[in-house]
């Protein structure tokens, strides 16, 4: 059966479903409404939608078929008029079955379901009573509170499993989204995969992969490259000053997000945000184009088709911290490449994103937000075309802006990443390992409140240059000293050249007395007065030679230029 393309919208009383099913016979169309589900069948199409709330058939319910466009408009009444159905634009969540939604656990705006597997202990155990455990405590509710509290501690230490224990538990290494995969990278070294830096992906533990990443970054970092980008930043400064569409969208959202979006759904808020952005003026009287606005919060037809083509699966995430931190790492790599190319991508962008991301290149699973940020800075200074600290800081501002815009903005980015990697002959494997799962998880289980908490934490996070471990301050001081020395030499050469040109012009226009005295031989314009190894003192040469001469400016040590005696003297 074919799942048709569809769209869902709502008002206070009804839900409207537009189904694109061309070339069907009207008399063969069948519908079934069951509490919170709508089932549609018309050979060869089949569609089952599970809504966040209950719907019913009433006098206002209807179904209209337009044979010209091949679209069927279905109108269903809400059982509770005025109820707001959340996330109607997240198509994967609508396609999920009731059981799949139960397995997925809670999502934003829904109640926490009971887990499939529950550990039941001995309620009469004296050890439990002695320890003061309360058998009436709702553990699941406590877990939900921990992961939705806006003050959730993103720096909570996660003790990684030891290499020995991990080797005993699993015969091969686990990697990918939430460490759910193995066997996909057995032959990675026989392909031209230039993203992968793991020596033995199928057998190396997470701790070994972490050590290997640090070693690769230390080897890749080029201090001369960094110093050159620090001094010669004419091409980099425009990239730093560039205002991304995400930052502009967040600016408009904060300014105008007041009573208009209070009490409305996320999808409706996205529509309001789009309207606000289209009429808002940005820096230097530049208006955001409507396509840029839509690209932040609204899904295109191609993206909707992508969401419908995603595999049907549920996630029992075991390490939520690593999954959320993986978002930060991948977003940084994507947004850095986007900023370097001023909002565009090129043929090398897929590799560049994969190389900068520790999650993709080294199958890293992070345990704290600070360690994630440090890894982003290290790779941002070792791999891209431009390696600049301010550029990395600006990119982290973009990451914060995207997280502040919410799950939809993140989902749109991951759909684009999936498209980029799917189209590559070698790197498509990372879609299987990460992007497919992230695109499904962002629609079904990701918490909007946790994403907002992450954005606030990123806003307060500050990374020092010492934390990357490469003595960046020393290299920058060295760069400044070298730059000042070059400027002094350049200034000296300009003064010398100007003096030579001036004296040459004076010789070309002699006075009358000079022309009358033709018997006196002319004095040379330029005279060699010494070699470079001789020292020069304040005014010794002018005492030895009565002719006035040009004195080059001295440096802080009292020596000329680099402490050498000038070889050329200009004579009147």
Image (cartoon, rainbow, N blue to C red):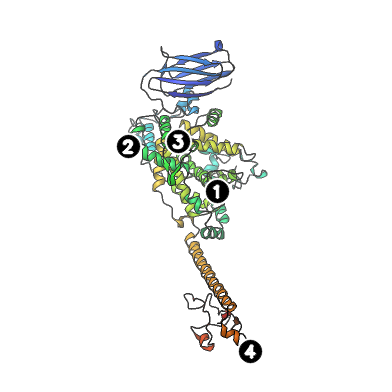
Give the spatial CA distance, label 3 vs label 2.
44 Å
Label disc, if present, on residue 130 of the rendered structure: 2
For mark 2, give the secondary structure: helix
Q: How many marks?
A: 4
Q: Is residue 510 left or right of residue 456?
A: right
Which element type, helix, strand or loop, lies under badge 1? Answer: helix
Residue beneath disc 4: 519
Q: Depth check: 259 or 8 in front?
A: 259
Which residue does the image show at 48% across and 78% down from the upper left? 558
Query: Measured from the top left, where is residue 133 in percent x and y?
Result: 33, 35
Identify the residue position indicated by label 3 in the image: 407
Question: Residue 374: percent from the left, percent from the top?
Answer: 47, 51
Mark 2 or mark 4: which is in front? 4
> What label sits on residue 208 in the rendered view?
1
Quadrant housing residue 84: top left
Report the Cα–Cα distance between label 3 and label 1: 32 Å
N-terminal of the pair, mark 4 or mark 1, is: 1
Closer to the chain start, of discs 3 and 2, is 2
Give the spatial CA distance, label 4 vs label 3. 93 Å
Q: Is residue 454 visible?
A: no
């Amino acid at each position: 059966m074919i799942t048709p393309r569809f769209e869902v919208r709502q008002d206070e009383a009804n839900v409207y479903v537009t189904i694109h099913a061309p070339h069907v016979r009207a008399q063969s169309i069948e519908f079934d409404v069951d509490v919170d589900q709508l089932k549609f069948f018309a050979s060869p199409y089949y569609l089952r939608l599970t809504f966040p709330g209950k719907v019913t058939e009433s006098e206002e319910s209807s179904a209209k078929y337009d044979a010209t466009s091949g679209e069927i408009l279905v109108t269903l009444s809400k059982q509770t008029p005025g109820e707001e159905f959340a996330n109607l634009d997240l198509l994967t969540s609508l396609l999920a079955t009731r059981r799949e939604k139960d397995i997925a656990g809670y999502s934003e705006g829904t109640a926490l379901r009971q887990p499939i597997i529950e550990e039941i202990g001995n309620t009469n155990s004296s050890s439990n009573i002695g320890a003061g455990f309360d058998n009436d405590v709702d553990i699941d509710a406590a877990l939900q509170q921990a992961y939705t509290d806006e003050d959730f501690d993103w720096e909570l230490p996660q003790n990684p499993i030891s290499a020995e224990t991990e080797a005993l538990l699993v015969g091969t290494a686990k990697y990918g989204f939430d460490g759910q995969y193995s066997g996909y990278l057995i032959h990675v070294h026989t392909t031209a995969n230039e993203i992968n830096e793991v020596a033995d992906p199928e057998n190396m533990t997470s701790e070994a992969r972490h050590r290997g990443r640090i070693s690769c970054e230390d080897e890749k970092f080029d201090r001369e490259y960094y110093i050159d980008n620090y001094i010669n930043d004419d091409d980099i400064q425009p990239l730093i000053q560039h205002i991304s569409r995400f930052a502009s969208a967040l600016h408009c959202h904060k300014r105008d997000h007041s009573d208009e979006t209070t009490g409305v759904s996320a999808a409706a808020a996205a529509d309001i945000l789009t309207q606000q952005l289209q009429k808002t003026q940005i820096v230097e009287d530049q208006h955001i184009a409507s396509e840029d606005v839509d690209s932040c919060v609204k899904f295109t037809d191609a993206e909707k088709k992508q969401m419908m083509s995603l595999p049907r699966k549920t996630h029992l995430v075991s390490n939520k911290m690593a999954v959320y931190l993986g978002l930060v790492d991948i977003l940084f790599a994507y947004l850095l490449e986007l900023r370097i190319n001023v909002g565009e991508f090129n043929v090398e962008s897929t590799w560049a994103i994969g190389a900068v991301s520790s999650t993709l290149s080294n199958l890293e699973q992070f345990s704290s937000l600070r360690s994630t940020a440090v890894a982003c800075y290290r790779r941002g200074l070792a791999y891209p075309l431009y390696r600049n600290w301010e550029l990395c800081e600006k990119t982290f501002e973009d990451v914060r802006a995207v997280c502040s815009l919410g799950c939809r903005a993140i989902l749109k980015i991951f759909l684009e990443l999936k498209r980029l990697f799917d189209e590559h002959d070698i790197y498509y494997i990372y879609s299987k390992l990460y992007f497919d799962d992230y695109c499904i998880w962002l629609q079904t289980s990701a918490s909007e409140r946790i994403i907002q908490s992450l954005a606030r934490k990123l806003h307060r996070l500050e990374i020092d240059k010492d934390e990357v471990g490469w003595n960046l301050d020393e290299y920058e001081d060295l760069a400044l000293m070298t730059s000042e020395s070059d400027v002094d030499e350049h200034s000296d050469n300009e003064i010398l050249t100007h003096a030579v040109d001036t004296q040459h012009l004076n010789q070309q226009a002699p006075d009358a007395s000079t022309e009358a005295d033709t018997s006196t031989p002319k004095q040379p314009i330029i005279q060699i007065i010494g070699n470079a190894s001789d020292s020069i003192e304040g005014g010794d040469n002018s005492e030895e030679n009565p002719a006035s001469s040009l004195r080059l400016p001295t440096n802080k040590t009292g020596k000329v230029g680099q402490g050498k005696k000038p070889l050329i003297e200009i004579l009147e």
